[in-house]
């Protein structure tokens, strides 16, 4: 049995005016040591050569390995959600893919290896994510994403994502949860909601401390790496001003759809989370009873302060 016999994988790529870096990403997909893949591209209304580049890549590949779809044209999160909810995309595994990164040759092989080696019960969601190596627009390495050390579970997922969507690989059971969601559902970001839903259902969450992709940082990036003290302060000010509370409301709409499927302890945690919108003393009590945390202790303290001012839920 070869490595590529562990299951087929659908690579879900969202594109929009990505001609500048797209070819490098496509060639890194072609170079994968794990060969049992199909690339499904949802283009969100590009006006440059993006679709031409995808079509040309399709001609290089055989056996209909590349499929180009028309996206909803409602932004990057809606585009990835469209792919996630598409019940016609059926495979053993799925990988999110950005248009401007570069994958290490063994990215899929490592991810599938870790997922397939984990004991799997029927209908158990499984999610893999990794750190990233950061590169600039010229492809020079400029750093690495933070290395997280704390456990990855629901109480963490409610306050932050644990890996970039561009690193995530997940199984059929997790995708099926989203296929049942109503078509008008909105999400904050595809990576965060995947972690939230998987952990809420006590699924398997795998974190690879070794980066498997080169994550490009440039002016067109919609979501950056959020590294550096000043960027963290700026981000916290935005969160405190109401951004996180708005995000939380959107995430809770999705969680309400699966609440009855949550294990008992996660139901209790979710109740404590919703109580963070109650009176002052109850907010304090619920934060500790729910054991909510971020991967950084200082950030957990900052979020506790936000909770004092009713800025979380």
Image (tube, grey):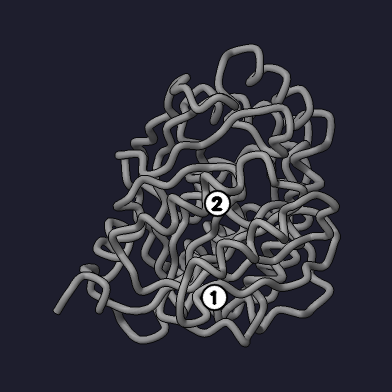
Residue drawn at point x = 43 percent, y = 37 percent: 132
- Answer with the quarter of the image where residue 238 lies: top right
Residue drawn at point x = 32 percent, y = 46 percent: 208
Q: Which disc, if any, is residue 164?
A: none
Horizontal and vertical percent position of residue 166: 53, 50
Decide if residue 302 is on the left or right side of residue 75: left
Residue for badge 2: 165
> Local crowd at mark 2 within 10 Å, few (<14), some, or many (≥20)?
many
Q: How many marks?
A: 2
- Answer with the quarter of the image where residue 256 lies: bottom right
Q: Secondary structure at mark 2?
A: helix
Sequence order check, earlier mark of 2 and 1: 2
Horizontal and vertical percent position of residue 176: 55, 81
Residue 34, above or below 278? below
Decide if residue 79 is on the left or right side of residue 126: right
Q: Which disc, if any, is residue 175?
A: 1
């Amino acid at each position: 049995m070869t490595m590529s016999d562990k299951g087929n994988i659908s690579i879900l790529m969202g594109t929009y005016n990505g001609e500048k870096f797209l070819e490098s990403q496509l060639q890194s997909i072609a170079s994968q040591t794990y060969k049992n893949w199909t690339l499904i591209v949802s283009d969100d209304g590009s006006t440059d050569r993006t679709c031409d580049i995808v079509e040309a890549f399709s001609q290089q590949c055989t056996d209909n390995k590349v499929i180009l779809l028309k996206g909803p044209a409602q932004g990057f999160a809606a585009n990835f959600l469209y792919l996630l909810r598409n019940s016609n995309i059926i495979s053993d595994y799925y990988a999110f893919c950005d248009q401007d990164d570069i994958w290490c040759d063994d990215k899929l092989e490592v991810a599938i290896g870790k997922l397939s080696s984990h004991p799997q019960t029927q209908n158990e969601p499984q999610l893999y994510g990794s750190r990233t190596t950061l590169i600039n627009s010229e492809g020079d390495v400029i750093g690495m994403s933070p290395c997280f050390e704390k456990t990855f579970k629901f109480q963490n997922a409610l306050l932050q994502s644990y890996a970039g969507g561009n690193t995530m690989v997940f199984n059929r059971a997790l995708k099926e949860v989203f296929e049942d969601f109503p078509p008008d559902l909105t999400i904050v970001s595809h990576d965060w909601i995947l972690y939230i839903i998987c952990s809420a259902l006590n699924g398997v969450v795998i974190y690879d401390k070794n980066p498997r992709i080169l994550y490009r940082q440039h002016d067109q990036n919609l979501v950056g790496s959020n590294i550096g003290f000043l960027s963290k302060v700026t981000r916290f000010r935005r969160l405190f001003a109401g951004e996180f509370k708005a995000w939380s409301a959107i995430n809770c709409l999705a969680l309400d759809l699966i609440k009855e499927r949550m294990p008992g302890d996660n139901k209790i945690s979710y109740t404590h989370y919703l109580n963070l919108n109650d009176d002052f003393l109850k907010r304090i009590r619920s934060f500790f009873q729910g054991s909510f945390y971020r991967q950084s202790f200082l950030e957990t303290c900052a979020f506790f302060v936000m909770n004092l001012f009713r800025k979380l839920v």
